[in-house]
Amino acid sequence: MPRRKIPTKAELIQLQKLYKTDERIAERLGNVTPQLVAYWRRKKNISKHSFPKFSESEIRDLWERYGDDYRSGLELGISKAAFYNWRRKYNFKEKPSFLKLEQLELDLGGPHKSVGKRHQYGRQTIVQKILSERAGLERAEVGQTMEVEPDLVISHDDSSGIIEEFHNRGHSHVWNPNRIIISHEHCLNAKSERKSTAFKAIRDFIRKQNIKNYYDILDGVCHQAIIERGLILPGQLAIGTGNHNASQGCIGACATNIETSEVIEVWTNGRTSLRVPESVGIIVNGKMPRGVYARDVILFIAGKLTGKAVDAKAIEFYGTAVSHMSISERFTLTDAAAELGARAVICPFDSTTRRYLMGRTKMPFRPALADRDAVYSETYEFNIDQLIPQAACPHMPDNIKPVAEIVGQHIDQVVIGMGTNGRLDDLKIVADVIKGKKIDPDVRMLIVPGSQEVYLEALKKGLIRAFLESGALVINSGCASFMWAHDGILAAGERCLSTTSSNLQGSMGSPEAEIYLVSPATAAISALKGVITDPSGFVK
């Protein structure tokens, strides 16, 4: 193996500016330990990165402005406990003796606090607040139909029909090209002349209307790209024709589905009518045990929600487990929950959301948080301290069993990636499991990065190489329906483990095939063994 070239002093300083700690620099360089990075620093007389220190005046100003550790910490990008420690250090122990404007009008507290100039006891949920804001009304009542102006409207390969009808109605220009997103994620390549003609019409329309947010064959799942690029923000409203718009609720936005005819209405005048749904509160407390991931959590919840408990309703996730999840893990929650029939799925804005959006957008936003006395049609509470890996068995996403109950069954195919579990941390889980090992020769393993950004980062970190050397097939980023048309068709009697969103009968080919939905760790371990395997004893 060739010896690694030692970075120059200028290169190390630049890496430190970007990645801060020795651990993250080592991860970025690959095949390097943090200890080696520290040694290079010392040899080149580069001091260890020191995180920002806050002056007494900064802490005093924020404390006098908000009088609340949580809100003050959000302004600095630190936790409630961290701000508390800073003000104790400077001996600011008493509450401010007078209230400033921000304390009266701006409340950016924990999950049960309100936002903006509304009182925190208005009995409004997050969805009600966002819809009333976009309708220009003071409040929204459950069941009320409101005319709203969305922040984003999304369409997919159904866009050609929408464009045709748009022109048939005599319209020539869309209301706001910057708020329109068109994606080809469901069908990246034209399989017929008819499809080619439709795609050409879409691309011609894009150019004529000057629509900048067009996701063609390279971009992958549009919902993932939208989050990565900061195109939807906390407190905003997105509507679209896809089944998984709800995934954008991972950053505290409200996203829901509409019909194609309604898209034409929005393209024309920028407004559409939405009915305010009931909201369901789901509280998830505890800590994920070894071998358990966000996908196991939402599968477990799906198995406990009987019948149509959340059908056509909005879900709001709370609890200590959710607050400790990354945005990627919250994306898994919101995307998978859409399969349960939810109208919208939201993880409330918090400091994790704020940190994720830093550097992704410079646009101002105002989060919407539920009132302390918000009214939910039902509230469910779960503790995951003792949770074990879960699987959705054929042929419904809520037919849930522990993986331990189905171990040993032979598998023919494993699919990892796409929207629900196609981000970098998902792929890293898989790479850590299979690196240096060989996939069972009787198993076909397909890896589908969720977006081009994920694909490129996986290349930089050596994950793609690990997949290929283990015998997996890595295909371009995209959505499930594209892959089933080209690479992932199942024959009668075959069994597949998948991290995608659906296991409905016939969704991957033959109606006589079986599809199990599992976490990336369960899928990866099973691919090595050739049979369904519980990952608990195999992962760190």
Image (spheres, rainbow, N blue to C red):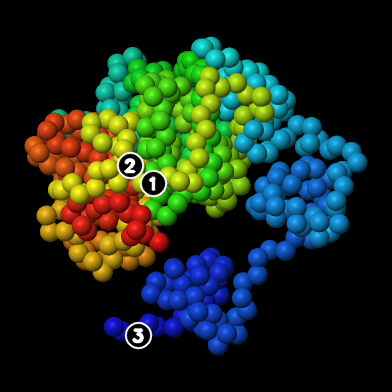
Instruction: Report crowding for label 3: few under 14, some 14 to 19, many 20 or more residues within 10 A (C-alpha).
Output: few
Residue depth check, mark 3 versus mark 1: number of the one nearer the observer: 1
The image quarter in which residue 101 lies: top right
Camera-side residue of 204 and 263? 263
Residue bearing the label numbered 3: 3
Which amino acid type is marked by label 2?
A: Pro
Q: Residue furthest left?
A: 492
Residue found at the very far bottom of the displayed protein: 43
The residues tagged by marks 3 and 2 sit, at their Cα atoms, a distance apart of 46 Å
Give the mark, 3 or 2, whose residue is nearer the N terminus. 3
Quarter location, residue 307: top left
Question: Closer to the N terminus: mark 3 or mark 1?
Answer: 3
Q: Marks 1/2: CA distance?
A: 7 Å
Residue receiving disc 2: 402
Q: Mark 3 or mark 2: which is in front?
A: 2
Looking at the image, which residue is at 53% across and 26% down?
379
Question: Residue 388 — which label?
Answer: 1
Q: Position of residue 472 (x, y in %)?
A: 20, 58
Element under label 2?
strand
Residue 208 vs residue 16, the one in the foreground = 16
> In the image, what residue occupies the spot 64% across and 33% down?
112
